[in-house]
Image (cartoon, rainbow, N blue to C red):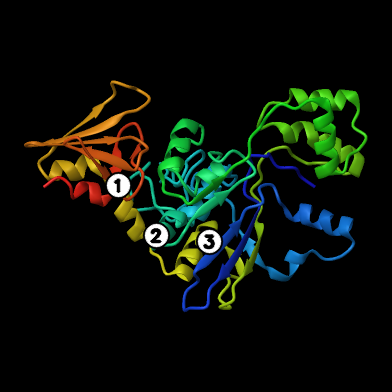
Amino acid sequence: MRRDKEKGIILAVLIFLAGMQAFAQSVIMLIPDGMSVAGTTLARFYKGEPLALDAIACGLVSTWNSDGTIADSAPAGSAYATGWASQTGNIASIGKSYVLPGVEIPEYEAQRPVATILEAARLSGRSTGIISTSEFMHATPADFSAHDVSRSNYDNLAEQIVYNNIDVVLGGIYEPAEAPAIRQTVSLYLGIANLTDEEVEAIGKTKAGSMNYTVGPMVGSRAKIGYTTNGHTGEDVVLYCYDPFGQRMTGLVRNTDIALYMARTMNVDLAQATSELFQDANSMFAKKGAKVATDTTDPENAVLVVTKGDQVLRVPRNKSYAYLNGRAVTSDGVVVYNGTKWYVARNLLDLIE
């Protein structure tokens, strides 16, 4: 059995569809990070009977990204969210390296943001939400709600998620706990009621994001199981799906097909959403005869400044608003700046005549 990183590759996909019309009105996607075939096998042994989700198992999903066979959470989640393979560390953005056979090379330029299924659903008038046991700007939830060339840019990701007009965002938080709370929590969720003082101390000293390295061996020693790796793996994972329309995917499915399947069932267009939300501001404003500059007076809050005649449009990074001659205007999506280029919603382009 293997144990994957807490922030590791996405290891199972569960999709539930609901609706009484020709297209699904609601889609619920569950991503149990770290859930492998070995994990569910062990769960059956422990339970002594089949799992409830066994009845909706329908296939396998590949997990590799554009530049390698072993993906971290960022490109793995991006594939599920956008329908495009991307490279290590990218959050819902096109990568630079496409080297694996069979991976479709996008027509979009490198490091361009691409719309997620959540953003496409929002444009269609649906309510959207993200619930995560990790921090909400962690790679997996961020893949559906933000865009950046690096999963480590937590400030950018958090700000975009706040301004991306998502109806519900719930995330976990890490807070150091005292010994009684540690014992109670481990007993409640892991069934370990006999932690030693040394184990309690080790848990208390563990930094956020590394708890699996500390707690994993404690679980393993008591359950009499071993782990082959602490890192990511490249194995295919199980796809579970409930679809009342009877159109669920089967067989071996590419990770990028997950987003396309959800888009098809909801009758939304990811490519159209990308066109509506992420236009190359530098080139498109220039075609209108406008001058484009980046104001970095505040390095942490860069602003795109577009000038044409008596029109001045100021577009803050990571926000969903702008200022035209000092008047606030709403953007249809968040503004993305990758350090070189700006990407803005089409409705902001239309403000410059």
Which residue is disc 1 drawn over?
331
Q: Quadrant of residue 282?
A: top left
In the rendered view, tell whether residue 188 sits above or below residue 21.
above
Instruction: Name the amino acid, label 3.
Output: Ile
Label placed on residue 312: none
Of badges 1 and 3, the one in the foreground is 1
> Which of the two residues, 225 or 159, is positioned nearer the viewer here?
159
Above or below residue 205? Residue 241 is below
- Few, some or many residues within 10 Å of mark 3 (<14, 14–19, 20+): many
Mark 1 or 3, nearer chain start? 3
**Residue 258: which disc?**
3
**How many numbered marks does the figure carry?**
3
CA distance for labels 1 and 2: 18 Å
Q: Looking at the picture, how far across and down is residue 291, in whole percent? A: 14, 35
* Mark in front: 1 vs 2: 1
Q: Residue at coordinates 88% horizontally, 55% vertically from top-left? A: 46
Three-letter code, disc 2:
Leu
Q: Earlier in the sequence, mark 2 or mark 3?
A: 3
**Identity of the residue drawn at 62% across and 53% down:** 31
Q: Residue at x 84, y 36 (%)?
A: 184
**Disc 2 on helix, strand or loop?**
helix
Q: Which residue is mark 2?
A: 270
Sequence-wise, the earlier of marks 1 and 2 is 2
What secondary structure is found at the residue carrying circle 1? loop
Check if mark 2's residue and mark 3's residue have beta carbons within 8 Å. Answer: no
Q: Secondary structure at mark 3?
A: helix
In the displayed structure image, the side of residue 292 where residue 217 appears, left or right: right
Q: Is residue 135 left or right of residue 49?
A: left
Q: Are marks 1 and 3 in contact (CB under 8 Å)?
A: no
Q: Is residue 83 visible?
A: no
